[in-house]
Amino acid sequence: MKVIKRDGHMVDWSPEKIEQAILKANQEVENDDQASGTQIKNIIKYIEGLGKKRILVEDIQDIIEMKLMSIGKYTLAKKYITYRYTRELVRRSNTTDRAIKELIDGESEYWNTENSNKNAKIVTTQRDYLAGITSTDITRRFLLPEDIVSAHDSGIIHFHDADYFAQNALHNCDLINLEDMLQNGTIINGVMIEKPHRFLTAMTVATQIITAVASSQYGGCTVSLTHLAPFVRDSYNRYLEKYKKRKLSKEDCEKFAKEDIKKEISDGVQTFQYQVNSMTTTNGQAPFLSVCMYLGETNEYKEELAMIIEEVLRQRIQGMKNEKGVYITPAFPKLLYVLEEDNIKKGSKYYYLTKLSAECTAKRMVPDYISEKVMKELKKNEYGEGECYPCMGCRSFLTPDRSISLGNVAKAKNYVPGKGKYYGRFNQGVVTINLPDVALSSDKDMELFWQIFEDRLELCHRALQIRHKRLSKATSDVAPILWQHGALARLDKGESIHDLLHNGYSTISLGYAGLYECVKYMTGHSHTDGAEGREFALAVMQKMNDKCKEWKEAENIDYSVYGTPIESTTYKFAKGLKERFGVIKGITDRDYVTNSYHVPVFEEIDAFEKLEKEAEFQRLSPGGAISYIETPNLTNNIDAVLEVINFIYDHIMYAELNTKSDYCQECGYDGEILLDEKLEWYCPNCGNRDHDKLNVARRTCGYIGTNFWNKGRTQEIKERVIHLDNKEC
């Protein structure tokens, strides 16, 4: 018999523990009120005689209390209840001490690999983690119901970002309304920042805004280069006017002004890149920033935007210098390149930018690609118009704007009546369901599966409601940069943000993980088999979408299905499955579960088939998703990258290519750093295994990670198969 503890872990039945607990209670009562050895053994035999394969520890304790009272040992039963209550208080007492010690000692695998873009040895990161430990403790003990905490601990669900939940003012990710802040001014730390008058200044102010915003939230944020393009023209006109005052010819004025603006764009982009990567937010890391490059976002400033995009791509191809002065791949900012008619076809006006982006992808793993064509098919606003806009951070997409008819709820100064609004919108948070656990809990009973699935979805729903209610208590004063000075809104002082949490203005996410393992266990097939596995997988995805629609209609809160980028949680879920159900070949025998709807990393499949099959599931993940293919070094085969890019444009909304970009500081090797059978990284050229002297960049789950990973994620990285060979397409 297995005993299920409060945290969801299963342990073997131990009659000795029952005997010891009753004997401890015996010591607190008179001899006449004590239970004899025989009576204790009878209670133990009764529990064993129930013939259960699994039993909750709470049920065991209830039985003991009932049996003690049935034999007249009322005083003893009372003492046992007191003992039980005392133990519960101990469990609920402050749990931060051990976690803090492990963090400060620097020997904890969990803390050292919790986030592949955070170095847990650095004091700024430790400060964020220390605050997070306290927040998590408060969240567990006071802010969440016991069943949600228990489900989270056992890996049945994951309540994301509990380390920031104690504050009721923090949200997940967003699209910064940079246009409003730059064109109409903003305030940072009480200092007024007026509209810049040249591009270089605008780029500098943009980095200050990004850092301030990223420090006031916990998710990723995105800005658009479109909002910086007008300042290129401002600078150009300043240069033109300067040369006109010198009485130069029109041709010379334009020639010199173009030379100057080209230099300023180069300087501005370099400033932006260095600032973003060198500044540290209050989260103890560089801002989790994405930068959108979308030519179709403007007509008036398209030429200026094209100039900025070109320079961003060229500087990213070059990379940034590491400690040895060698150019390597930086983690941030993540670049988002929108594919559209003007840049996708050979001979089109801006095809040169797409070709440059392909070179950048081959060398530095970015940009990622958004298909304007597919996105407009999927994302239609309340008037039925298809719209294209960037994701918030790595993959979180807003649902189409349903607040158009409501007017300017955020009081933005750049609001356009009747037009969909995306910049200034945000996500309230995520709770993720562990799909393999639903399947395994059903023991392949299909009717039971749907029943358990329904229960687990409602558990996630209650957890999401708690997230929403906590955030709804915030006022604009808690983060003026967000709510008062334009990043998300321009509300009055003391004004509630409540209205921005409803009517589709912001989203809240039902995450999911492990669709492959769930389907494989229930049907024996992969979800990409085109038959039984596919049909079941689509039904699972549709069920989540139906529940989100049901919740949304009942509460006017924009619930949305989200393909979660689980990083450390992939290991947590896998460990929980092993502990609860044992090792099942092909299901729980790895240290990770598959992200969202993805084809498992070990499944042999070519790049185009993978993207085509995953596109069907990406459509059912409207709150956020990204697909990828693994490739070898393609720096000498840009045509292959372009072929994939063309395929993305026609078939899937959002996808990326995972190339390799490493460097060994010991010997200068810049090929792929490898993993041995023990999941240790090493340089194949000199054998160096010192993490401090290895620069390894891998796509973790949307973002590029550069600070190594936990055991589960590392195993997943090792088992990734190549989807595109290095041959002519």
Image (tube, rainbow, N blue to C red):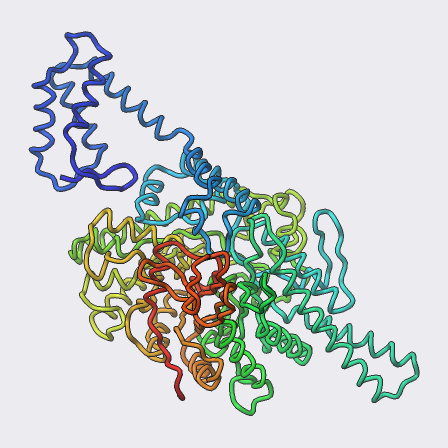
Q: Specify whether 282 is left or right of 31.
A: right
Q: Specify whether 525 is left or right of 185.
A: left
Can residue 503 be seen here?
A: no
Q: Name the residue at 37% across, 38% down.
A: 145
Q: Is residue 70 above or below residue 319?
A: above
Residue 74: percent from left, percent from top: 18, 14
Q: Quadrant of residue 269?
A: bottom right
Direction bottom: furthest residue: 347
**Quadrant where the C terminus lies?**
bottom left
Q: Name the residue at 56% across, 49% down.
A: 284
Q: Is residue 227 above or below residue 453?
A: below
Q: Name the residue at 67% across, 81% down.
A: 303
Q: Is residue 90 above or below residue 119?
A: above
**Quadrant where the N terminus lies?**
top left
Can residue 4 be seen here?
A: yes
2 vs 555, nearest the viewer: 2
Residue 246: percent from left, percent from top: 92, 80
Q: Quadrant of residue 249?
A: bottom right
Residue 474: percent from left, percent from top: 56, 43
Residue 540: percent from left, percent from top: 28, 62
